């Protein structure tokens, strides 16, 4: 089955710790995205990548980092510089990088701070 | 500054009736619009989309209407079913990224 997988489903972070959220897709999609959702809020774009070894900042990139070494994988690191990391994190992908591409989402990772 | 607005946080509808979810946008550059459905603790699921060259798109029980002059779009669900109860997000695009509204929670009661 083709799709997007995110792991883990729940992640706990201690103060001052960096944590990495995994996102893998087997849809052969070129573009991948990371969003953050807070209660009562829409999805806000953190980073996106249109091609391997290239990525761009979204609206709320501060305190986050990404890499795109493989087409299938787009891990997100929440660094200690992110002061309010508790949120639901969603990864998405789209087949192309044009203006009218539908994005498909993974199941999400909930990050909690201990 | 919110470029995509869903002004109704929630909507309650009886089973079998029509659900109408609304979305307004401010950026006239947007030319592609999508609706997603989301259950708690899950990722959004794509429902239906419309490009700015159209004013209506249908897919089964779901129809999206676009009024470019009013910068307004709406999602109609007919007939509504209890399984439609979820949060619905409107999203808009003019580049390779999407801008989302805050969502409307739809509750369909039997």
Image (tube, coloured by chain):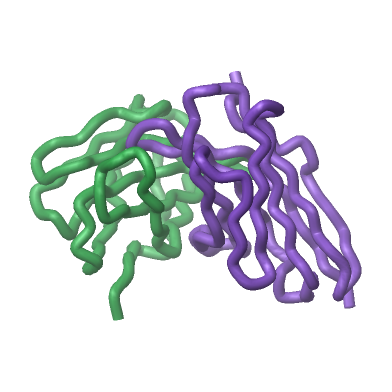
**Foreground residue, A87 or A100?**
A100
Give me the residue at 66% from left, 59% from top. B63
Left or right: B60, with A96 as reference point: right
Q: Is residue A71 above or below residue A63?
A: below
- B30 in relation to A39, above or below: above
Q: Which residue is drawn at 29% across and 28% down?
A: A57
B83 relative to A50 in the view: left or right: right
Q: Looking at the image, which is closer to me, B46 or B54?
A: B54
Chain identifier of the green chain: A
Q: Give the residue furthest to the top.
A: B1
Q: Which quadrant of the view contains residue A107?
A: bottom left
Q: Where is residue A67 in the image (x, y as percent from the top left)?
A: 16, 42
Give the percent coordinates (x, y) of residue A24.
24, 62
Towards the viewer: A71 or B60? B60
User: Can residue A40 be seen from the camera position used here?
Assistant: no
**Residue at (26% x, 55% y) in the render:** A95
| Chain identifier, purple in the render | B
Seen in the picture, residue A27 relative to B25 is either above or below; the reply is below
Q: Quadrant of residue B39?
A: bottom right
Residue A51: image location, x then y, percent? 14, 43
Task: Please identify the quarter of the rendering in which residue A26 is found.
Answer: bottom left
């Amino acid at each position: 089955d083709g799709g997007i997988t995110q792991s883990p489903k729940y992640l706990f972070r201690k103060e001052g710790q960096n944590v990495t959220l995994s996102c893998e897709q087997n849809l052969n999609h070129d573009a991948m995205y990371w969003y953050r959702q807070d209660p009562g809020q829409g999805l806000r774009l953190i980073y996106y990548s249109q091609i391997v070894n290239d990525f761009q900042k979204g609206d709320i990139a501060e305190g986050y980092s990404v890499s795109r070494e493989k087409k299938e994988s787009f891990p997100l690191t929440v660094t200690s510089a992110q002061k309010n990391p508790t949120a639901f994190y969603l990864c998405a992908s789209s087949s192309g990088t044009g203006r009218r591409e539908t994005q498909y989402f993974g199941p999400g990772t909930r990050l909690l701070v201990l | 500054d919110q470029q995509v607005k869903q002004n109704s946080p929630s909507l309650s509808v009886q089973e079998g009736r029509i659900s109408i979810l609304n979305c307004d946008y401010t950026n006239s550059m947007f030319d592609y619009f999508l609706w997603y459905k989301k259950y708690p603790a899950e990722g959004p699921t794509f429902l239906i989309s419309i490009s700015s060259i159209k004013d209506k798109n249908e897919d089964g029980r779901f129809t999206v209407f676009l009024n470019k002059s009013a910068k307004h779009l709406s999602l109609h669900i007919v007939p509504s079913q209890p399984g439609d109860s979820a949060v619905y997000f409107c999203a808009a695009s003019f580049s390779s990224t999407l801008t989302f509204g805050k969502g409307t929670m739809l509750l369909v009661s039997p």
